[in-house]
Image (cartoon, helix red, strand yellow):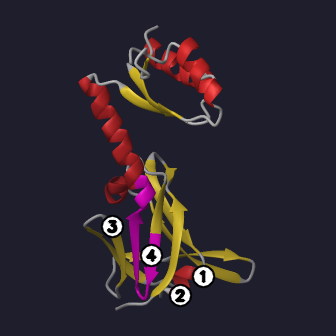
Amino acid sequence: MEMMRHYLVTSIGENKGAPRVWLQGSNLNHAGFNPGTRFDIKLDDARLVLTRSDQGIRVVSRKRRGESEYPVIDINSRELLEMFEGMSAVRVVMLEEEIHILPLASELRRQERVERTAARMGQGDPLEIGSLSHGGGIMCHAIHAGLYREGLDSRLVFANEIRPELLDHAREANDCWESDGEARYSG
């Protein structure tokens, strides 16, 4: 089993309209990716794998800062990075002579939530809303009203408030709440 040299989270940038992952610094040296080192990139399931290879088609660049020289790997390719579309960051696992670029678990969960929400909206189902520190429900009312103005139905499925009298007031005065204790904004 290979020993992990470094683990980092880096953002996905953009250059000339294409996504970009920029890696630089001594962490690359520790993984065997020194300036001038040749490597290949391949897609492997849900990851991008950079492997040192004497016959590699890519070369680790160099960046000079004063007397020091740092390795740089710049991946600026829509084709290679398309699996990370819609994500703002990736995780980078540096092994000896290999670098794995993978999606962050939090980014995958965020994408799943967006897809579920889009599916609900496409089916015409109301968006389910929860409210924390609900108070009198002013923010909740504003969210429901804004969604309603855009033609989206929403339903308050829970409200949390430390002061029960505020929940009682919201239930009576806020039109997000329905008479059965649920809430649906009706305009």
Tell me if residue 96 comes above or below residue 168 in the rendering: below
Distance from Cα at disc 1 to Cα at disc 4: 14 Å
For label 3, the crowd category at 10 Å Cα-Cα, with few meaning under 14, some 14 to 19 and many 20 or more, is many
Tell me the SS state at disc 3. strand
Residue contact at pointers 4 and 3, CB within 8 angstroms? no
Q: Amino acid at mark 4?
A: Val
Q: What residue is drawn where x is 66% and y is 76%?
A: 64
Distance from Cα at disc 1 to Cα at disc 3: 23 Å
Q: Amino acid at mark 1?
A: Ser
Mark closest to the chain's N terminus, 4 or 3: 3
Mark closest to the chain's N terminus, 2 or 4: 2
Tell me if residue 4 comes above or below residue 101 in the rendering: below
For label 4, the crowd category at 10 Å Cα-Cα, with few meaning under 14, some 14 to 19 and many 20 or more, is some
Q: Which quadrant of the figure has residue 138?
A: top right
Q: Position of residue 167 (x, y in %)?
A: 58, 26
Disc 1 marks which residue?
Answer: 26
Disc 2 marks which residue?
Answer: 30
Residue contact at pointers 1 and 2, CB within 8 angstroms? yes
Q: Position of residue 127 (x, y in %)?
A: 38, 28
Mark closest to the chain's N terminus, 1 or 4: 1
Q: Position of residue 11 (x, y in %)?
A: 53, 58
The magenta span reads 92-107
Mark closest to the chain's N terminus, 1 or 3: 1
- Left or right of 186 on screen, residue 26: right
Q: Which mark is residue 93?
A: 4
For label 2, the crowd category at 10 Å Cα-Cα, with few meaning under 14, some 14 to 19 and many 20 or more, is some
- Left or right of 121 on screen, residue 65: right
Question: Which residue occupies the extreme right position in the image?
Answer: 66
Distance from Cα at disc 3 to Cα at disc 2: 21 Å
Tell me the SS state at disc 2. helix
Q: Which mark is residue 47?
A: 3
Front disc: 1 or 4: 4
